[in-house]
Image (cartoon, rainbow, N blue to C red):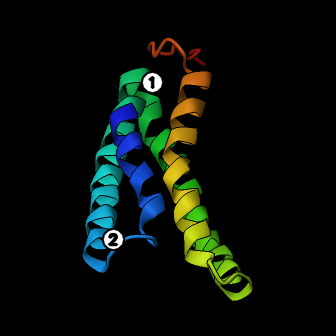
Amino acid sequence: MFVFALCVVPIAFATRVSDWTAVLLIGLAGAAHQAWSANLYTTVSDMFPKRAVATLIGVGSAAGSVGGMIFPIITGMILDHFLNGYSIIFGFCSIAYLVAFALNHLLAPKFEPIALETS
């Protein structure tokens, strides 16, 4: 997943390169996002028991949906207030996966299956 997180970093330069180079950088970031999300789904099923996987995927999807509602609002505010708004947005996006990777390893450093208590 670290490799996919690194593949998103060049998107920070999307506003400083030619149009087609920007398209290629955005395409690379989109592909890395798909690889990241596919691996994230398997991370849940590798670490948690079968009875908890659907619940955790649902919680993660709900959090992603809320983020998907908030991000366009914040993006609009940034674009309204800053002349270089796209640079700010692409800069944030370029480090988001590295931050997520670091949080993932902070919360699950050994990447071991988690045993849930039975009720």
Q: Nearer the viewer, mark 1 or mark 2?
A: 2
From the top left corner, tell me how far across and down residue 109 is, in percent: 54, 16
From the top left corner, tell me how far across and down residue 31 is, in percent: 27, 55
Task: Judge whether residue 88 can be spotted in this image.
Answer: yes
Q: CA distance from mark 1 to mark 2?
A: 39 Å
- Label 1 neighbourhood size at 10 Å, few (<14), some (14-19), many (20+)? some
Mark 2 secondary-structure assignment: helix
Residue toward you, 41 or 101: 101
Instruction: Identify the residue at image location x=74%, y=84%.
Output: 81
Instruction: Identify the residue at image location x=28%, y=46%.
Output: 35
Q: Where, quadrant-wise, is the N terminus in this rendering?
A: top left
Relative to 23, is 11 on the left or the right?
A: right
Mark 1 lies on residue: 48
Relative to 19, is 100 on the left or the right?
A: right
Farthest-out residue, right: 81
User: Looking at numbered disc 2 in the image, what kind of residue is underneath it?
Assistant: Ala
Q: Which mark is residue 22?
A: 2
User: Which circle's residue, 1 or 2, is located before the other in the chain?
Assistant: 2
Query: Looking at the rendering, which quadrant does residue 67 occupy?
Result: bottom right
Mark 1 secondary-structure assignment: loop
